[in-house]
Amino acid sequence: MREKPKPQMRIWAMFCHLSALLAWILLFFLVFLGIPVYLPLNILVPLIIWRLKKAKSPWIDFQGKESLNFQISLTVYILIVIIISLLLMLTICGIAITTNSTGKEIKTLLDTLLFVWLLLTSSMILLQLFLVNFAAMKAYKGEHYRYPWTIRFLR
């Protein structure tokens, strides 16, 4: 893969990255309409593109794996944040019940937890937005790019 891939292959490699963002937009739109979707569309859509196009070019294969590894890692990180948040909320409620805390103290603790959760979630979304766009540009230019903090599930 030393030579620059053909333009059509670079476009498909770019779509492997950008399709995850389009999947997030679709997911938010469906939830906004009241349709609960529990599928990780950010993984499913790049997976479909990668599976359909990976045999055409090693460049698409490489970029598709990179995109999928990042999306799977990001989904795992989000699940970890959700699980820790739920455990903290249960702990706070348990402590509040056993110590006969006032409603104001509980509200303050839960508001703080909500603020931290929103801060973490929004920073992960912004980081994904930046990194996916950056990776898509690199893929289109035919340059190698590896996402940071990514667990390599696919090699």
Image (cartoon, rainbow, N blue to C red):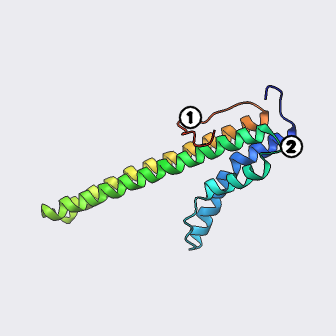
**How busy is the neighbourhood of tag 2: few (under 14 within 10 Å), some, or many (20 plus)?**
few
Quarter of the image where the C terminus is located: top right
Quarter of the image where the N terminus is located: top right
* Residue 93 image position (x, y, % from top left): 24, 62
Q: Which residue is mark 2?
A: 8
**How busy is the neighbourhood of tag 1: few (under 14 within 10 Å), some, or many (20 plus)?**
few
To which quarter of the image does residue 24 belong?
Answer: bottom right
Q: Amino acid at mark 1?
A: Pro
- Is label 2 in a helix, a strand or a loop? helix
> Which residue sits at x=57%, y=68%?
37
Residue furthest out toward the left: 99
From the viewer's perspective, is 44 left or right of 2?
left
> Which residue sits at x=65%, y=62%?
26
Q: Which residue is mark 1?
A: 148
* Residue 118 image position (x, y, % from top left): 43, 53
To which quarter of the image does residue 54 belong?
Answer: top right
* Residue 146 image position (x, y, % from top left): 63, 33
Q: Amino acid at mark 2?
A: Gln
From the viewer's perspective, is 149 left or right of 85?
right
Question: Is residue 1 placed above or below 113 in the rendered structure?
Answer: above
